Image: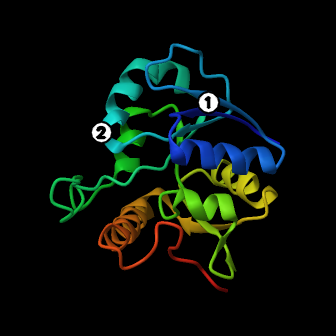
Amino acid sequence: MAHLSIIGTGTMAQAIADVARKGGSTVDLIGRGDTTPVTGDVVVLAVPYGAVAEIVEQRGAELAGKVVVDITNPVDFETFDGLVVPADSSAAAEIQAALPDSRVVKAFNTTFAGTLTAGTVGDVTTTVLVAGDDEDAKRLVSDVVDAAGLRAVDAGPLRRARELEALGFQQITLAASEKVSWTGGFAVVA
């Protein structure tokens, strides 16, 4: 399987690490301030959107040639009233522009840690929507998800990250207002 370096050690980082390990991948968890080298073929940015620019600045050279997975939702957490990226862009597009020698994939931003860990949303297998411009990179991330018994769905090119971020934002605001559970969420039934 794959070798993942996950930058971040929070709830989502732990859940993604568990998914990857369950599917037979190896994982390194790297704290945001940690200077441990990034050795994974796949690097997951499991940090808040506001921390991404600093990580890209510090580790940009290390991320060249790697698949970089953006899980962020660039939500305005002060107002919960929208996304903080331009209407014609996304956090993933910003990361791709900052890392032109990396293959950026948007994934895991429309799932909560609880549904990744449980493997289900209600009675439906947890779905991870995956968007990116590099087909091999999307396939690699999808294989990690599928190997763990979850369901990866190709959501299209990286420009679809904007819609995925809006969906993630909607799910977060519903959970924050207690209209859905933090262990619930959206599922795709085909």
Neighbor class of circle 1 (other Cα within 10 Å; few <14, some 14-19, many 20+) is many
- Mark 2 is surrounded, within 10 Å at the Cα level, by few (under 14), some (14 to 19) or many (20 or more) other residues, namely few
Q: Is residue 125 left or right of residue 50?
A: right
Outermost residue, left side: 79
Seen at 65% across and 70% down, the residue is 126
Q: Position of residue 110 (x, y in %)?
A: 48, 64
Type of amino acid at the residue the image marks with label 2 = Gly
Q: Dividing the image into 4 quarters, which one contains the N terminus?
A: top right
Which label is found at residue 50?
2
| Residue at 69% from the left image edge and 57% from the top image edge | 142
Q: Residue at x 37, y 54 (%)?
A: 73
Residue kind at label 1, given as amino acid type: Leu
**Quarter of the rendering containing residue 94:** top left
Mark 1, secondary structure of its residue:
strand
Is residue 104 among the parts visible in the rendering? Answer: no
Residue 36 visible? The answer is yes
Residue at point 55%, 56% (across, down):
113
Image quarter hosting the C terminus: bottom right
Q: Give the labeled residue for mark 1.
A: 29
Q: Quadrant of residue 154?
A: bottom right
Q: Position of residue 189 (x, y in %)?
A: 64, 85
Q: Earlier in the sequence, mark 2 or mark 1?
A: 1
